[in-house]
Amino acid sequence: MTAAIFTSNLKKSYGQKEVLKGITLTVDPGTICALLGTNGAGKTTMVRILTTQIVPDAGQAAIMGHDVVRDADHIHQVIGLTRRTCSSSLRSATFPARQKRLMRCLRGWAWRKQAAVWSRHIPAA
């Protein structure tokens, strides 16, 4: 079975600051996974690598068997990413169920039905 998330010896540095120091991780499909750590532990860097926003300095990372560097376009089609903190116009929409509906709208799923729901929940800017 292909891992939902796979990393091997993942490394990332910013100047002299080594943020990820050889992270190896395997998350099976259907598993709920959380990244926990203190400020500066590399959580955001790890998520940015896995979502193809930045590239690692060394090591491998893959989502459902697709390399985050070579297959970034495919990964963009299969993942959804929402931030925990949003602008004030979206703050009421930060609960998980609402985030899922927002991602469906942004990806074009059931657009007409969801657009009516969101127009009631998100005030115009």
Image: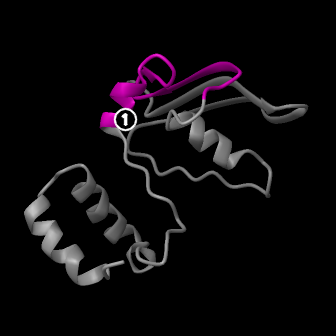
Identity of the residue drawn at 22% across and 58% down: 105
Q: Which residues are magenta?
A: 55-77
How many marks are shown on the rendered structure?
A: 1
Q: Assign the N terminus to one quadrant of the image.
A: top left
Q: Quadrant of residue 38?
A: bottom right
Q: Is residue 74 magenta?
A: yes
Identity of the residue drawn at 48% across and 78% down: 88
Is residue 84 depicted above or below 80 in this figure?
below
Q: Residue 52's x, y, as percent?
A: 51, 33
Reading the image, the residue beneath label 1 is: 76
Horizontally, residue 96 falls left or right of residue 16, namely left
Q: Residue 28's x, y, as percent?
A: 45, 36
Mark 1: amino acid: His
Q: Quadrant of residue 15?
A: top right
10 Å neighbourhood of mark 1: few (<14), some, or many (≥20)? few
Colouring convention used in this rendered image of the protein? one colour
Q: Residue 90's x, y, as percent?
A: 41, 73
Identity of the residue drawn at 30% across and 35% down: 77
Identity of the residue drawn at 27% across and 54% down: 106
